Image (spheres, helix red, strand yellow):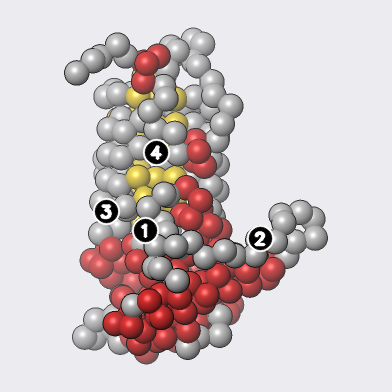
Amino acid sequence: MPPDEELRYPSPPPIDSTTTTDDEAGWVWAQIKAEARRDAESEPALASYLYSTILSHSSLERSLAFHLGNKLCSSTLLSTLLYDLFLDTFASDPSLCVAAVADLRAARVRDPACISFSHCLLNFKGFLACQAHRIAHKLWNQSRRPLALALHSRISDVFAVDIHPAAKIGKGILLDHATGVVIGETAVVGNNVSILHHVTLGGTGKASGDRHPKIGDGVLIGAGAIILGDVKIGKGAKIGAGSVVLIDVPPRTTTVGNPARLLGGKEKPTKHEECPGESMDHTSFISDWSDYII
């Protein structure tokens, strides 16, 4: 099979009241292994790599623990230690694997550059940083804070993504490109959120306490956007690229610019029906916002 030809997978399990998380995780893991076998056959130079990272493992958790351990290890923080730590953490909290599966599906559906689940698992640093953060967050909540902070530092060094281990991140998250993403200690990010590169969810100074943004479900945050302080970004809102947001943004609205302004005005902002975090529509608002022409 040519390497650029799509595999024809069985349909994923339908999402209804009878679908279990094990069904969905099993389906995604089966696709990942099928993709790895295809790629090992079409590119023998990768066969050993694909065997060690995917095909030799019995589950997504084991593959992810192995891969993250090798990515984040150093001369003094050994990959075997990290593998055991990650695997134990996955085993103690099944919701971590549920979130990983949701993130894999988010990348596959929302990012046209994501050619396969295995490509995301192995190569998407936003995905890998998010999974490693969830482990660091678990350690933080277990009062293993020196270890959580050490892991946080390695994630920042390796992936150029800086998420404080106390920050709360939902599932179905896409950190697209991911370079330069900064998420502060008291930030909260909901489910099905898409965040582009060089986004900052930061504080406003040296004050302690609850001081970082709260991002609702289904939000889309464009590249280079800066959101500062304990502000609320409503469910399904859209933050345009390069915007600087310092106040709350209502649900289902679009805000653009520096300083950010609501599309349609503050009194009666224009509302959209789609979920921007899933549709990834960055620019359809532009004709309503500006008549600027190059």
Q: At which x and y percent is residue 163?
A: 35, 57
Q: At which x and y percent is residue 12?
A: 65, 61
Residue at label 2?
11
Q: Is residue 143 left or right of residue 19?
A: left
Which quadrant holds the N terminus? bottom left
Disc 1 and disc 2 in contact, CB within 8 angstroms? no
Rendered residue at 44%/45% (across/down): 194
Residue at label 3?
179
Residue at label 4?
221
- Frontmost residue, 48 versus 124: 48
Residue 126's disc number: 1
Q: What type is the residue that disc 4 sits on?
A: Ile
Circle nearer the viewer, 1 or 2: 2
Alpha carbon separation for disc pair 1 and 2: 26 Å
Alpha carbon separation for disc pair 2 and 3: 33 Å
Alpha carbon separation for disc pair 4 and 2: 31 Å
Q: What type is the residue that disc 2 sits on?
A: Ser
